[in-house]
Amino acid sequence: MSEPIRVLNLFTIMNRGGAETMVMNYYRAIDKSKIQFDFMVHRQERGAYDDEIEAMGGRIFRMCPIYPQNLFRYQQMLKEFFDNHPEYRILHSHMSELGYFAFKEAIRHDVSVRICHAHNAPVFSSETAIEKLKRIPRELLARQMRKLSTDYFTCSQIAGEWLFGKKNSKKLIFMRNAIDAQAFAYNETKALRVKADLDWTDKFIIGHVGRFCPQKNHNFLIDIFKVFHSKYPNSILALVGSGELQGNIQEKVKNMGLDKDVCFLGNRADMPNIYQAFDVFLFPSFYEGLPVSLIEAQASGLPCVISDTISDQTRLTSAYYPVSLKEKPEQWVAQLEKCMEMQHADTTAMIKEAGFDIYNNAKWLTNFYLNKLS
């Protein structure tokens, strides 16, 4: 029996982010007798998914962070890596324009398939001052990535057009942020049990899943909840995730007197259960590519109140309510109120019909890799 083709995935670190979770969904479902995933990461510490990757036979190679002061060292590490690993014929980067350095070295080592994958579409006007300063070098590297990539993968039109340019929109290959739809299917008995376990019985739970970073707009999310909670004191805001702004948000919550009503759940391995305990999903991001969490929330039968900046390609169910970020918190609260009497539903069939179930997508990806090398 022949050995599987090993695909080298590029990431910063394999923690529970959207792109990382999506790739792990594919990794679990893919036929590992044909395709095996390995990972080149750019942090020395272990990620949340590392144990599972290694248990499935994946290898993890650790590089230095891609900081300006590290560039010479990083390029030397890349050369040494590809000198020692001629087995890789497919490189699949999930690092946007930062895959440039690895792709450049991969070309020197005759890696024939170089997939660049767009997961996000930044809106620099909403970013921090430091991120705004990165705009010009990011855009310059993005242009270079277009020349070095053999295939332009994306999760959404807007993400693809940012990284690859609108003139290349016909070259985009859509790889869906697919999930195991059945695992997230709403179950009333399970929902009541999870609520009881979290001491949320008879509470109205507003849920949010996302990294604590400027993109996710947690400050505004807390402002919305403050107005909502003043009208409905039995409500709780549940925040799943971690990140550099978590301390700031915790301080804001404390200063607003909401520390007993906002739950910081951290990163969770049991997200199918956590979604069951939510009553509505609130997601006021400044921008997104195509967020996995929004697919998961809809698969869990939740009404979703989201910012209108998010691509309409994420609309998989009818309980999907975009609101403008220009609106005041009161308008968002009005939409949340409309969701309070909604009954949860099993939306598994809708998710599958929309093409977001993982198993068919994993077969598609397997065939894509095999056909590229045939």
Image: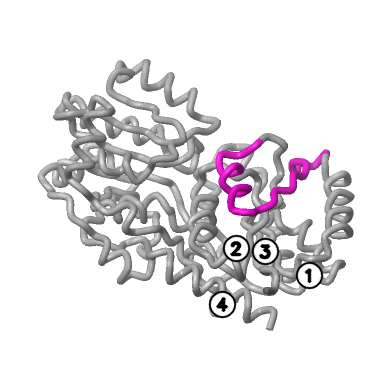
52 is within the stretch colored magenta: yes
Q: Quadrant of the N terminus?
A: bottom right
Distance from disc 1 to disc 4, alpha carbons, whole Å, reads 19 Å
Q: Which residue is mark 1?
A: 111
Which three-letter amino acid code belongs to the residue tagged 2?
His
> Which residue occupies 54% across, 71% down?
365
Distance from disc 1 to disc 3, alpha carbons, whole Å, reads 11 Å
Q: Which residue is mark 2?
A: 117
Along the viewing direction, whichever of 69 and 299 lies nearer the viewer = 299
Which three-letter amino acid code belongs to the residue tagged 4?
Asn
Distance from disc 2 to disc 1, alpha carbons, whole Å, reads 17 Å
> Which residue occupies 16% across, 46% down?
339
State which tag comes first along the sequence, 1 or 3: 3
Q: Which residue is mark 3?
A: 7
Q: Quadrant of residue 335?
A: top left
Q: Quadrant of the C terminus?
A: bottom right
State which tag comes first along the sequence, 4 or 3: 3
Q: Secondary structure at mark 3?
A: strand
User: Which of the labelled discs sits on residue 367, or is there none?
Assistant: 4
Q: Secondary structure at mark 1?
A: loop
Q: Magenta segment range? A: 46-69
Q: Nearer the viewer, mark 2 or mark 1?
A: 1
> From where the camera sits, is residue 273 visible?
yes
